[in-house]
Image: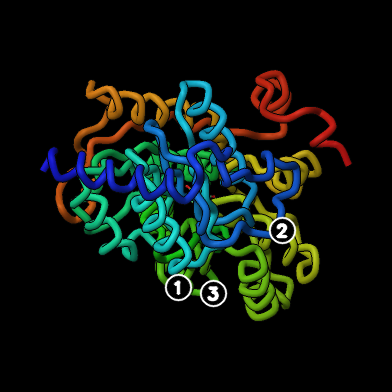
Amino acid sequence: MKKLFAMLLALAMILSLAACGGSTAPAATQAPAATEAPKAEAPAATEAPAAGGNLVGVAMPTKDLQRWNQDGENMKKQLEAAGYTVDLQYAANDIATQVSQVENMIANGCEVLVIASIDGEALGTVLDQAKAAGIPVIAYDRLIMNSDAVSYYATFDNWKVGVKQGEYIVEALDLANAGDKKFNIEYITGDPGDNNINFFFDGAISVLKPYIDAGTLVCPSGQTEKQAVATANWATDAAQARFETILGTYYADGTNLDVVLASNDSTALGVANALESSYTGTYPVLTGQDCDIASVKNMLADKQSMSVFKDTRTLAAKTVEMVDALMKGTEPPINDTKTYDNGTGIIPSYLCEPVVGTKDNVQELLIDSGYYTQDQLNG
Ligand code: BGC
Protein backbone atom coordinates (compact mmCIF):
# COMPACT_ATOMS: atom_id res chain seq x y z
CA MET A 1 0.00 0.00 0.00
CA LYS A 2 2.82 2.39 0.91
CA LYS A 3 4.54 1.63 -2.38
CA LEU A 4 1.31 2.25 -4.31
CA PHE A 5 0.78 5.51 -2.47
CA ALA A 6 4.33 6.63 -3.23
CA MET A 7 3.85 5.79 -6.90
CA LEU A 8 0.53 7.61 -7.06
CA LEU A 9 2.05 10.57 -5.32
CA ALA A 10 5.01 10.68 -7.65
CA LEU A 11 2.70 10.46 -10.65
CA ALA A 12 0.48 13.21 -9.27
CA MET A 13 3.51 15.39 -8.65
CA ILE A 14 4.86 14.87 -12.15
CA LEU A 15 1.45 15.66 -13.67
CA SER A 16 1.01 18.65 -11.44
CA LEU A 17 4.51 19.98 -12.10
CA ALA A 18 3.92 19.55 -15.82
CA ALA A 19 0.63 21.39 -15.56
CA CYS A 20 1.82 24.22 -13.35
CA GLY A 21 5.39 24.66 -14.46
CA GLY A 22 6.38 23.80 -10.93
CA SER A 23 6.58 27.30 -9.59
CA THR A 24 3.12 28.80 -9.45
CA ALA A 25 1.93 30.31 -6.23
CA PRO A 26 -1.06 28.71 -4.53
CA ALA A 27 -4.15 29.27 -6.65
CA ALA A 28 -6.45 29.15 -3.70
CA THR A 29 -6.31 32.62 -2.30
CA GLN A 30 -9.37 33.33 -0.20
CA ALA A 31 -10.70 36.52 1.24
CA PRO A 32 -9.42 37.16 4.76
CA ALA A 33 -11.66 36.58 7.74
CA ALA A 34 -14.07 39.37 7.18
CA THR A 35 -16.42 41.34 9.31
CA GLU A 36 -19.14 40.44 6.87
CA ALA A 37 -18.95 37.11 5.13
CA PRO A 38 -18.35 37.62 1.44
CA LYS A 39 -21.06 36.17 -0.76
CA ALA A 40 -19.05 35.06 -3.75
CA GLU A 41 -17.61 31.59 -3.53
CA ALA A 42 -14.51 30.35 -5.24
CA PRO A 43 -15.36 28.14 -8.20
CA ALA A 44 -14.85 24.40 -7.89
CA ALA A 45 -11.14 23.74 -7.65
CA THR A 46 -9.76 23.48 -11.11
CA GLU A 47 -6.36 24.90 -10.38
CA ALA A 48 -4.39 23.82 -7.39
CA PRO A 49 -1.20 24.88 -5.73
CA ALA A 50 1.96 23.49 -7.19
CA ALA A 51 2.76 20.20 -5.63
CA GLY A 52 6.22 19.86 -4.28
CA GLY A 53 5.56 17.94 -1.14
CA ASN A 54 3.87 19.14 2.00
CA LEU A 55 0.61 19.95 0.25
CA VAL A 56 -2.46 20.00 2.52
CA GLY A 57 -6.03 20.15 1.20
CA VAL A 58 -8.51 22.13 3.30
CA ALA A 59 -12.16 21.83 2.21
CA MET A 60 -14.58 24.27 3.84
CA PRO A 61 -18.37 24.24 3.35
CA THR A 62 -19.23 27.85 2.53
CA LYS A 63 -18.24 31.47 2.76
CA ASP A 64 -21.81 32.46 3.62
CA LEU A 65 -21.29 32.07 7.34
CA GLN A 66 -18.65 34.11 9.06
CA ARG A 67 -17.08 31.30 11.02
CA TRP A 68 -15.91 29.21 8.04
CA ASN A 69 -14.08 32.21 6.60
CA GLN A 70 -12.26 32.49 9.90
CA ASP A 71 -11.62 28.75 10.14
CA GLY A 72 -10.22 28.61 6.61
CA GLU A 73 -8.02 31.66 7.04
CA ASN A 74 -6.71 30.58 10.43
CA MET A 75 -5.87 27.15 9.14
CA LYS A 76 -4.14 28.46 6.01
CA LYS A 77 -2.13 30.99 7.97
CA GLN A 78 -1.05 28.48 10.61
CA LEU A 79 -0.28 25.68 8.16
CA GLU A 80 1.81 28.01 6.02
CA ALA A 81 3.66 29.21 9.12
CA ALA A 82 4.46 25.56 9.82
CA GLY A 83 5.94 25.22 6.34
CA TYR A 84 3.06 23.61 4.43
CA THR A 85 1.45 24.60 1.16
CA VAL A 86 -2.32 24.84 1.41
CA ASP A 87 -5.06 24.22 -1.12
CA LEU A 88 -8.03 25.93 0.58
CA GLN A 89 -11.42 25.59 -1.10
CA TYR A 90 -14.96 26.69 -0.26
CA ALA A 91 -17.91 24.83 -1.77
CA ALA A 92 -20.86 27.28 -1.60
CA ASN A 93 -22.76 24.68 0.45
CA ASP A 94 -22.99 22.53 -2.68
CA ILE A 95 -22.19 18.88 -2.08
CA ALA A 96 -21.18 18.11 -5.69
CA THR A 97 -18.77 21.05 -5.61
CA GLN A 98 -17.19 19.82 -2.39
CA VAL A 99 -16.83 16.30 -3.79
CA SER A 100 -15.08 17.61 -6.90
CA GLN A 101 -12.85 19.88 -4.84
CA VAL A 102 -11.72 16.92 -2.74
CA GLU A 103 -11.21 14.82 -5.88
CA ASN A 104 -8.94 17.54 -7.24
CA MET A 105 -7.03 17.73 -3.97
CA ILE A 106 -6.32 14.01 -4.19
CA ALA A 107 -5.34 14.24 -7.87
CA ASN A 108 -3.06 17.18 -7.17
CA GLY A 109 -1.06 15.33 -4.56
CA CYS A 110 -2.40 16.58 -1.23
CA GLU A 111 -0.88 14.43 1.47
CA VAL A 112 -3.42 15.16 4.19
CA LEU A 113 -7.04 16.27 3.79
CA VAL A 114 -8.87 18.46 6.30
CA ILE A 115 -12.58 18.48 5.54
CA ALA A 116 -15.46 20.42 7.11
CA SER A 117 -18.25 18.60 5.32
CA ILE A 118 -21.48 20.11 4.07
CA ASP A 119 -23.35 16.86 4.57
CA GLY A 120 -21.58 14.35 6.76
CA GLU A 121 -23.11 11.44 4.88
CA ALA A 122 -22.45 12.53 1.32
CA LEU A 123 -18.72 12.20 0.73
CA GLY A 124 -18.48 8.39 0.60
CA THR A 125 -16.74 7.48 -2.65
CA VAL A 126 -14.32 10.36 -2.84
CA LEU A 127 -13.12 9.40 0.63
CA ASP A 128 -12.61 5.85 -0.58
CA GLN A 129 -10.27 7.32 -3.18
CA ALA A 130 -8.35 9.13 -0.45
CA LYS A 131 -8.09 5.94 1.55
CA ALA A 132 -6.91 3.96 -1.47
CA ALA A 133 -4.18 6.55 -2.02
CA GLY A 134 -3.15 6.36 1.64
CA ILE A 135 -4.16 9.96 2.35
CA PRO A 136 -5.30 10.53 5.94
CA VAL A 137 -8.53 12.50 6.38
CA ILE A 138 -9.18 14.79 9.34
CA ALA A 139 -12.86 15.62 9.82
CA TYR A 140 -12.92 19.28 10.83
CA ASP A 141 -15.61 20.52 13.22
CA ARG A 142 -18.29 18.26 11.67
CA LEU A 143 -17.93 14.50 11.81
CA ILE A 144 -17.96 12.71 8.45
CA MET A 145 -20.29 9.76 8.85
CA ASN A 146 -20.18 6.16 7.66
CA SER A 147 -16.73 6.26 6.12
CA ASP A 148 -13.76 4.31 7.39
CA ALA A 149 -11.48 6.73 5.55
CA VAL A 150 -11.75 9.23 8.41
CA SER A 151 -8.62 9.04 10.55
CA TYR A 152 -9.16 11.82 13.12
CA TYR A 153 -11.72 14.37 14.20
CA ALA A 154 -10.86 17.88 15.39
CA THR A 155 -13.77 19.79 16.88
CA PHE A 156 -15.19 21.52 19.91
CA ASP A 157 -16.98 19.58 22.59
CA ASN A 158 -20.30 19.73 20.77
CA TRP A 159 -22.32 18.08 23.54
CA LYS A 160 -20.98 20.66 25.96
CA VAL A 161 -22.08 23.45 23.61
CA GLY A 162 -25.67 22.22 23.97
CA VAL A 163 -25.30 21.69 27.71
CA LYS A 164 -24.09 25.27 28.14
CA GLN A 165 -27.10 26.58 26.21
CA GLY A 166 -29.44 24.47 28.36
CA GLU A 167 -27.75 25.57 31.59
CA TYR A 168 -28.00 29.20 30.54
CA ILE A 169 -31.75 28.82 30.05
CA VAL A 170 -32.21 27.08 33.42
CA GLU A 171 -30.41 29.91 35.14
CA ALA A 172 -31.93 32.80 33.18
CA LEU A 173 -35.48 31.63 33.92
CA ASP A 174 -34.56 30.31 37.39
CA LEU A 175 -36.27 27.08 36.45
CA ALA A 176 -35.11 25.31 39.60
CA ASN A 177 -37.40 27.62 41.62
CA ALA A 178 -40.22 27.84 39.08
CA GLY A 179 -42.81 26.09 41.27
CA ASP A 180 -46.10 26.05 39.31
CA LYS A 181 -44.94 28.66 36.84
CA LYS A 182 -44.92 27.71 33.16
CA PHE A 183 -42.66 29.07 30.44
CA ASN A 184 -43.22 28.94 26.70
CA ILE A 185 -40.29 27.62 24.72
CA GLU A 186 -39.61 27.16 21.00
CA TYR A 187 -36.71 25.32 19.43
CA ILE A 188 -34.53 25.70 16.36
CA THR A 189 -31.48 23.77 15.27
CA GLY A 190 -29.40 23.46 12.09
CA ASP A 191 -28.90 21.38 9.00
CA PRO A 192 -30.19 17.81 9.28
CA GLY A 193 -27.08 16.56 7.40
CA ASP A 194 -24.77 18.06 10.03
CA ASN A 195 -24.05 15.47 12.70
CA ASN A 196 -23.29 18.29 15.14
CA ILE A 197 -26.99 19.08 15.54
CA ASN A 198 -27.44 15.79 17.39
CA PHE A 199 -24.92 16.87 20.00
CA PHE A 200 -26.01 20.51 20.23
CA PHE A 201 -29.72 19.73 20.45
CA ASP A 202 -29.55 16.57 22.55
CA GLY A 203 -26.97 18.17 24.88
CA ALA A 204 -29.30 21.09 25.55
CA ILE A 205 -32.36 18.87 25.93
CA SER A 206 -30.48 16.67 28.42
CA VAL A 207 -30.41 19.71 30.73
CA LEU A 208 -33.94 20.94 29.96
CA LYS A 209 -35.66 17.56 30.05
CA PRO A 210 -36.61 17.53 33.75
CA TYR A 211 -38.37 20.87 33.25
CA ILE A 212 -40.07 19.69 30.05
CA ASP A 213 -41.23 16.51 31.79
CA ALA A 214 -42.50 18.49 34.78
CA GLY A 215 -44.54 20.77 32.49
CA THR A 216 -42.51 23.85 33.44
CA LEU A 217 -41.35 24.31 29.86
CA VAL A 218 -44.21 24.15 27.37
CA CYS A 219 -43.93 24.36 23.59
CA PRO A 220 -47.07 26.03 22.13
CA SER A 221 -46.20 25.15 18.50
CA GLY A 222 -45.72 21.50 19.41
CA GLN A 223 -42.58 21.50 17.23
CA THR A 224 -40.20 19.67 19.52
CA GLU A 225 -38.60 16.92 17.45
CA LYS A 226 -35.11 17.52 16.08
CA GLN A 227 -36.18 16.97 12.48
CA ALA A 228 -39.14 19.35 12.86
CA VAL A 229 -36.95 22.13 14.23
CA ALA A 230 -34.03 21.64 11.80
CA THR A 231 -32.96 24.40 9.37
CA ALA A 232 -31.54 23.50 5.96
CA ASN A 233 -28.01 24.89 5.59
CA TRP A 234 -28.40 26.69 8.91
CA ALA A 235 -29.89 29.52 6.83
CA THR A 236 -30.94 32.73 8.58
CA ASP A 237 -33.75 33.37 6.05
CA ALA A 238 -35.28 29.95 6.64
CA ALA A 239 -35.05 30.42 10.42
CA GLN A 240 -36.76 33.79 10.13
CA ALA A 241 -39.53 32.43 7.91
CA ARG A 242 -40.26 29.52 10.26
CA PHE A 243 -40.38 31.78 13.30
CA GLU A 244 -42.58 34.36 11.59
CA THR A 245 -45.07 31.55 11.00
CA ILE A 246 -44.78 30.29 14.58
CA LEU A 247 -45.19 33.78 16.03
CA GLY A 248 -48.12 34.54 13.74
CA THR A 249 -49.87 31.27 14.55
CA TYR A 250 -49.27 30.69 18.26
CA TYR A 251 -48.35 34.05 19.75
CA ALA A 252 -50.44 36.62 17.85
CA ASP A 253 -53.10 36.53 20.60
CA GLY A 254 -50.66 38.04 23.11
CA THR A 255 -49.21 34.75 24.36
CA ASN A 256 -45.70 35.40 25.65
CA LEU A 257 -42.70 33.60 24.23
CA ASP A 258 -40.28 33.15 27.12
CA VAL A 259 -37.36 31.35 25.57
CA VAL A 260 -35.94 30.14 22.27
CA LEU A 261 -33.30 27.43 22.21
CA ALA A 262 -31.38 28.25 19.03
CA SER A 263 -28.41 26.02 18.30
CA ASN A 264 -26.26 28.69 16.68
CA ASP A 265 -25.99 32.34 15.74
CA SER A 266 -27.13 32.15 12.11
CA THR A 267 -30.44 30.65 13.25
CA ALA A 268 -30.66 32.95 16.29
CA LEU A 269 -30.29 35.88 13.92
CA GLY A 270 -33.30 34.65 11.93
CA VAL A 271 -35.28 34.31 15.17
CA ALA A 272 -34.29 37.85 16.23
CA ASN A 273 -35.40 39.19 12.83
CA ALA A 274 -38.74 37.41 13.17
CA LEU A 275 -39.21 38.77 16.71
CA GLU A 276 -38.58 42.23 15.37
CA SER A 277 -41.15 41.90 12.58
CA SER A 278 -43.83 39.73 14.17
CA TYR A 279 -43.83 39.90 17.98
CA THR A 280 -44.80 42.49 20.54
CA GLY A 281 -44.57 40.59 23.83
CA THR A 282 -41.72 40.51 26.35
CA TYR A 283 -38.46 39.68 24.59
CA PRO A 284 -37.50 36.02 25.11
CA VAL A 285 -34.23 34.50 26.29
CA LEU A 286 -32.45 33.57 23.05
CA THR A 287 -29.39 31.32 22.82
CA GLY A 288 -26.81 30.99 20.06
CA GLN A 289 -23.34 29.75 19.21
CA ASP A 290 -20.21 31.08 17.47
CA CYS A 291 -20.13 34.70 18.65
CA ASP A 292 -20.61 35.86 15.05
CA ILE A 293 -20.30 39.62 14.74
CA ALA A 294 -24.00 40.15 13.96
CA SER A 295 -24.95 38.14 17.04
CA VAL A 296 -22.45 39.89 19.30
CA LYS A 297 -24.00 43.17 18.18
CA ASN A 298 -27.41 41.69 18.98
CA MET A 299 -26.20 40.65 22.42
CA LEU A 300 -24.97 44.17 23.09
CA ALA A 301 -28.40 45.45 21.98
CA ASP A 302 -30.26 42.90 24.19
CA LYS A 303 -31.64 41.05 21.18
CA GLN A 304 -29.78 37.82 21.91
CA SER A 305 -28.98 36.61 25.42
CA MET A 306 -25.92 34.45 24.93
CA SER A 307 -23.72 32.73 22.45
CA VAL A 308 -21.17 29.97 22.80
CA PHE A 309 -17.71 31.11 21.79
CA LYS A 310 -15.63 28.58 19.91
CA ASP A 311 -12.25 30.14 19.28
CA THR A 312 -11.47 29.07 15.72
CA ARG A 313 -7.81 29.98 16.28
CA THR A 314 -7.56 27.17 18.84
CA LEU A 315 -9.29 24.63 16.61
CA ALA A 316 -7.04 25.57 13.69
CA ALA A 317 -3.95 25.27 15.91
CA LYS A 318 -4.96 21.77 17.06
CA THR A 319 -5.72 20.69 13.50
CA VAL A 320 -2.35 21.98 12.35
CA GLU A 321 -0.71 19.91 15.11
CA MET A 322 -2.62 16.88 13.80
CA VAL A 323 -1.55 17.53 10.21
CA ASP A 324 2.04 18.06 11.29
CA ALA A 325 2.08 14.80 13.24
CA LEU A 326 0.60 12.88 10.30
CA MET A 327 3.16 14.38 7.95
CA LYS A 328 6.01 13.49 10.29
CA GLY A 329 4.68 10.07 11.22
CA THR A 330 4.22 10.90 14.90
CA GLU A 331 1.08 10.64 17.07
CA PRO A 332 -1.54 13.39 16.52
CA PRO A 333 -2.93 15.00 19.69
CA ILE A 334 -6.22 13.45 20.83
CA ASN A 335 -8.18 13.80 24.05
CA ASP A 336 -11.30 11.74 23.34
CA THR A 337 -11.56 8.14 22.22
CA LYS A 338 -15.14 7.32 23.19
CA THR A 339 -17.65 9.92 22.03
CA TYR A 340 -17.63 10.12 18.25
CA ASP A 341 -18.66 6.94 16.46
CA ASN A 342 -19.15 7.71 12.78
CA GLY A 343 -20.87 4.43 12.04
CA THR A 344 -17.62 2.60 11.27
CA GLY A 345 -16.25 2.85 14.79
CA ILE A 346 -14.95 5.49 17.16
CA ILE A 347 -12.94 8.25 15.52
CA PRO A 348 -10.10 9.47 17.75
CA SER A 349 -10.84 13.13 18.44
CA TYR A 350 -9.50 16.31 19.89
CA LEU A 351 -12.25 18.35 21.55
CA CYS A 352 -11.63 22.05 22.19
CA GLU A 353 -13.43 23.86 25.01
CA PRO A 354 -16.47 26.02 24.25
CA VAL A 355 -17.06 29.09 26.46
CA VAL A 356 -20.26 31.01 27.18
CA GLY A 357 -20.33 34.53 25.77
CA THR A 358 -22.74 37.23 26.97
CA LYS A 359 -22.75 40.98 26.69
CA ASP A 360 -20.95 41.03 30.04
CA ASN A 361 -17.78 39.29 28.86
CA VAL A 362 -17.55 40.52 25.26
CA GLN A 363 -14.66 42.80 26.14
CA GLU A 364 -12.53 40.13 27.79
CA LEU A 365 -13.51 37.17 25.61
CA LEU A 366 -13.56 38.76 22.19
CA ILE A 367 -11.77 42.08 22.20
CA ASP A 368 -8.95 41.68 24.74
CA SER A 369 -8.18 38.26 23.22
CA GLY A 370 -7.74 39.92 19.81
CA TYR A 371 -10.55 37.92 18.19
CA TYR A 372 -12.37 41.10 17.14
CA THR A 373 -11.49 44.76 17.18
CA GLN A 374 -13.80 47.22 18.88
CA ASP A 375 -14.45 48.73 15.44
CA GLN A 376 -15.86 45.47 14.13
CA LEU A 377 -18.45 45.47 16.90
CA ASN A 378 -19.45 49.12 16.57
CA GLY A 379 -22.46 50.27 14.64
C1 BGC B 1 -20.76 24.35 13.54
C2 BGC B 1 -21.31 25.63 14.12
C3 BGC B 1 -21.92 26.48 13.02
C4 BGC B 1 -22.84 25.66 12.15
C5 BGC B 1 -23.30 26.44 10.95
C6 BGC B 1 -21.82 23.65 12.76
O1 BGC B 1 -21.36 22.44 12.25
O2 BGC B 1 -20.25 23.54 14.56
O3 BGC B 1 -20.29 26.35 14.77
O4 BGC B 1 -22.65 27.53 13.57
O5 BGC B 1 -22.22 24.49 11.70
O6 BGC B 1 -22.27 26.78 10.13
- The secondary element bearing badge 1 is classed as loop
Which residue is located at x 30 percent, y 60 percent?
126
Between marks 2 and 3 in the image, the one whose residue lies nearer the viewer:
2
The residue wearing badge 1 is 228
Taking the image as shown, residue 155 lies to the left or right of residue 43, namely left
Residue furthest right as drawn: 379
The residue wearing badge 3 is 221
Alpha carbon separation for disc pair 2 and 3: 18 Å
The image shows residue 51 at horizontal and vertical percentages of: 42, 39
| CB contact under 8 Å: marks 2 and 3 | no
Residue 272: which numbered mark, if any?
2
Relative to 280, does residue 72 appear above or below in the rendering?
above
For the C terminus, the quadrant is: top right
Could one spot residue 209 in this view of the protein? no
Looking at the rendering, which quadrant does residue 293 occupy?
Answer: top right
Which residue is located at x 58 percent, y 46 percent?
27
Label 2 neighbour load within 10 Å: few <14, some 14-19, many 20+: many
Looking at the rendering, which quadrant does residue 151 occupy?
Answer: top left
